Image: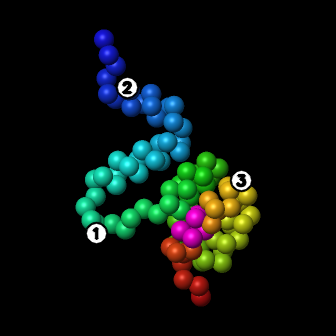
Amino acid sequence: MSASPIKKGIFLLCLMGWAGVWLLLYLLLSGCSTPGERPPVQAGQILYSAKCASCHRLLPPEDYTSDVWQEYVSKYGKQMAEAQRQEVLDYLQKNAKPSQ
């Protein structure tokens, strides 16, 4: 008797870990939208979700200014490769709260 598709899906999610969960969620949701319905997901957004959520809850990019995000990524993003850090920072700064 073979396992149900749901059991197979849960098994695969357990094997892939959080990064795989985020990737799978992105792929599933991106296939459900129509062009122009919402802005495309950026690589930095995926990295931000995958890397930063492993240590703490995700903060909305619009809660802080570009300068604050620069400080946070410099201070807390040391475990990421430089290219990944820059992708995350680009995403956060693009969506940051305007400076006063």
Circles 1 and 3: CB atoms closer than 8 Å: no
Look at the image and say whether residue 88 sits in the magenta stretch: yes
Q: Under tag 2, what secondary structure?
A: helix
Farthest-out residue, bottom: 100
| Mark 2 or mark 3, earlier in chain | 2
Which residue matches tag 2? 7
The amino acid at mark 1 is: Gly
Q: Is residue 44 above or below residue 97?
A: above
- Separation of marks 2 and 3 at Cα, in angstroms: 34 Å
Q: Which badge, 1 or 3, comes first in the chain's sequence?
A: 1
Judge from the rendering whether residue 48 lies leftward or rightward of residue 79; answer left or right: left
Judged left or right of residue 98, residue 27 is left
Marks 1/2: CA–CA distance: 34 Å
Residue 58 in the image: x percent, y percent? 56, 58
Discs 2/3, front: 3
Q: Does the magenta stretch include residue 55?
A: no
- Quadrant containing the C terminus is bottom right
Which residue is at a point 35% across and 47% down the rendered structure image? 28
**Mark drawn on residue 79:** 3
The magenta span reads 87-92
Tell me which colouring the rendered structure shows.
rainbow
Structural crowding at the residue carrying mark 2, measured as other residues with C-alpha within 10 Å and reported as few (<14), some (14–19) or many (≥20): few
- The kind of secondary structure element at disc 3 is loop
Ranked by sequence position, the earlier of labels 1 and 2 is: 2
Tally of numbered discs: 3
Please, what is the three-letter code of the amino acid marked with disc 2?
Answer: Lys
**Position above or below: 90 against 51:** below
Residue ID for mark 1: 36
